[in-house]
Image (cartoon, rainbow, N blue to C red):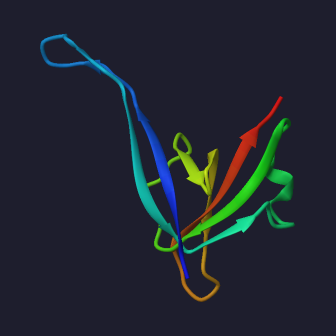
Amino acid sequence: MSEEVIRIRRNPGGLDDNNDPIPSSVSRDPLKAKAVAPGASKRNASLARQGETIEHTVYFMPAPDLTNDDELEIRGLVCKVRILDWRSAFGTGRRGLEVLAVTGRG
């Protein structure tokens, strides 16, 4: 069973070859998550920074194109991401991603 989440990536503007401004854009792309768990595991609970709450832990297999600068929309909630390697106990190398979806409330 999998769940669809939306990757939100903000692409900064800039200048083209003629030094004309290029507007910034926001892309919203669906990703298939292997699983979405509420909150954080005991192992990852201490990774929340001051003022942050880990809302979900999202597991991806295989690892998608996702960076710490992206955001994920999970069940209608937009969260910043913190990416961790999810390594299989039965293999070597990077197999998937464990993503902490955090919200900051002040």
Q: Tell me how many marks there are.
A: 0
Above/below status of 95 relative to 22: below
Frontmost residue, 33 versus 92: 33
Classify residue 100 by image quadrant.
bottom right
* Residue 88 rendering spot, x and y as whole percentages: 60, 81
* Residue 10 rendering spot, x and y as whole percentages: 44, 34
Classify residue 85 by image quadrant.
bottom right
Above/below status of 17 relative to 80: above
Question: In the displayed structure, does residue 20 sit left or right of residue 92?
Answer: left
Frontmost residue, 78 versus 100: 78
**Residue at x 19% of width, y 19% of height:** 16
Viewport quadrant of the C terminus: top right
**Residue at x 61% of width, y 70% of height:** 86
* Residue 70 rendering spot, x and y as whole percentages: 52, 43
Question: In the displayed structure, does residue 33 sit left or right of residue 18?
Answer: right
**Residue at x 14% of width, y 18% of height:** 17
The answer to whether residue 81 is seen in the rendering is yes
The answer to whether residue 64 is seen in the rendering is no
Frontmost residue, 31 versus 13: 31
**Residue at x 81% of width, y 67% of height:** 41
Viewport quadrant of the N terminus: bottom right
The residue lying furthest to the bottom in this view is: 90
* Residue 55 rendering spot, x and y as whole percentages: 75, 54
Above/below status of 92 relative to 102: below
